[in-house]
Amino acid sequence: MEEPTYLKEINNGISEMYKSIMEIYGDVLSVMGEPDEVKAKEICEKTKSVMEQEEKVIDLCVEALIRHQPFAGDLRAVTSAMRVSYDLARISRYLSNIVQVIGDVNSGLSCAPDVKELLESGWEMIQESIRSYLSKDPILATSVIEEDAKIDAGYRKVLSKYKDYAAGGACVLMNGLIARIIERMADHACYISAETVYMVTGSRIGVRAPKCPPEHHHQ
Amino acid sequence: MATKLVTEKLSAWFGKKQVLKDVSIAFEERQVTALVGPSGCGKSTFIRCLNRMHELNPGARVDGKVFLDGLDIYGMDPMEVRRKIGMVFQKPNPFPNMSISDNVVAGIRLSGDARKSDLDEIVERTLKSVGLYDEVKEDLKRSGASLSGGQQQRLCIARALAMQPEVILMDEPTSSLDPASTSRIEELIRKLKSEITVIIITHNVGQAARISDKTAFLYLGELIEYNDTKAFFESPKSPITERYITGRFG
Ligand SMILES: Nc1ncnc2c1ncn2[C@@H]1O[C@H](COP(=O)(O)OP(=O)(O)OP(=O)(O)O)[C@@H](O)[C@H]1O
Ligand SMILES: [Mg+2]
């Protein structure tokens, strides 16, 4: 089915956001390897421009709703684009948060690689979620959501590794914080994937709801 | 939600040509149901079967059942059916040589069941309910045909309402009206459903989305999809429905 022009424009906007956060990701990796204040500032600026791109996508969506009053798949594509652009903006902010934490804790970075692997797996999920979205592939989207358990496990591994440190210290703090950020980023990859499933099939899978602990039974 | 009007395997013909095929649908009481579908799919024929107008065409035939509150309308007196199930047409058609007030009560006069003293009260109440009273109260004796198109259509709705129908069928009632008259009638339809079951044909899918609780899609004489309006327009089940409502037909 031929896609209307306004949806093409909206998806171009999403692709642009994706390109920007790919750049930011590359910069973050390099700052994790070697602290660099100039690059850190650049990352912050690039993140700001992602926020502007998000505004632009939302504008296009609102205009599409007004002008075209879309229905069915077209309607779902517009509402999903609004959510996905938010998720992408959030991911870019999380990426710049990582750099902030590195700067704020200022631990000399010798312990950063502890979370690098986690970041790479999280990033893998993000890329695939966006790919699933842009290529309208609910199967790929579902596989991303299944991956999330691994990130959650990796996050808990980082926390438990440092839990035993008697005095805590900078590494504990920094890696704990970063691991948490990555875990959140991966959640947004799941949100994007859920939008893919919704946009293509019309059914909602409730991944945005928090994962609550199971109920305690009092004896 | 109670069902008001139910069709079971309703089929209709013009001569040898079958234009409706086994349409089974249950209309809910005091809800607005929109009927959509491409030109010629049988929407008008369908609603004309619901108040026994289709059979008035020479050579026309109906098969299947239509139940109003559980009673088969094809076993009832046709006049009684048309009193309970009123109709508003695409083109406003006030009786041209009748005054505004006579138009409103034309049906009541024909059925001969009202006294003169009641009629003035019915005229006022009904014209108020369609929001026309204030616009015409200075001169209720002027010809119905002297009103604007939007006013004429509201007059025709008033004429149908004066009979106190339980169901009202509307065949593209706003297609010849400007946006302001259209939105007045849409508002009226939303108000009507507190008392009446409304079934409306429209080519304007936006209008169906705005005013209806349920939407049905007819295609080539068959019912393709029938669902709550939100679900119908957000996630239609049939690809044919999807193509129709997103304007990708043909
Ligand atoms: N009086 C008639 N004699 C013969 N065939 C007719 C007659 N009226 C309608 N038809 C045919 O019956 C089919 C259904 O017509 P109908 O008027 O019910 O369609 P519709 O869905 O209301 O279309 P539209 O949206 O254009 O009003 C069409 O193929 C039409 O040509
Ligand atoms: Mg018609």
Image (cartoon, coloured by chain):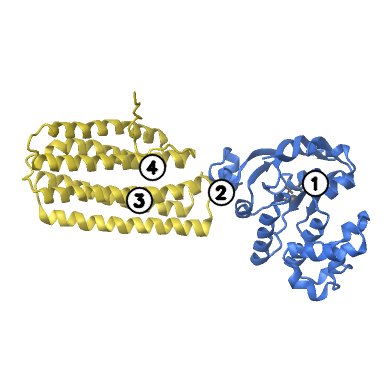
Mark 4, residues whose alpha carbon is within 10 Å: few (<14), some, or many (≥20)?
many
Q: Can the viewer see residue B30?
A: yes
Q: Is mark 1 within 8 Å of ligand 1?
A: yes
* Residue where numbered disc 3 is placed: A86
* Residue where numbered disc 4 is placed: A133
Residue A4 against residue A123 in the figure, above or below: below
Amino acid carrying label 3: it is Tyr
Of the chain colours in the picture, the one used for chain A is yellow
Give the left or right position of residue A210, taking residue A124 as reference: right
Q: Nearer the viewer, mark 3 or mark 4?
A: 3
* Residue where numbered disc 2 is placed: B246
> Distance between the Cα atoms at labels 3 and 4?
14 Å
User: Chain for mark 2?
Assistant: B
* Residue where numbered disc 1 is placed: B48
Amino acid carrying label 4: it is Tyr
Q: Are marks 1 and 2 in contact (CB under 8 Å)?
A: no
> Distance between the Cα atoms at labels 2 and 4?
21 Å
User: Chain for mark 4?
Assistant: A
Q: Secondary structure at mark 4?
A: helix
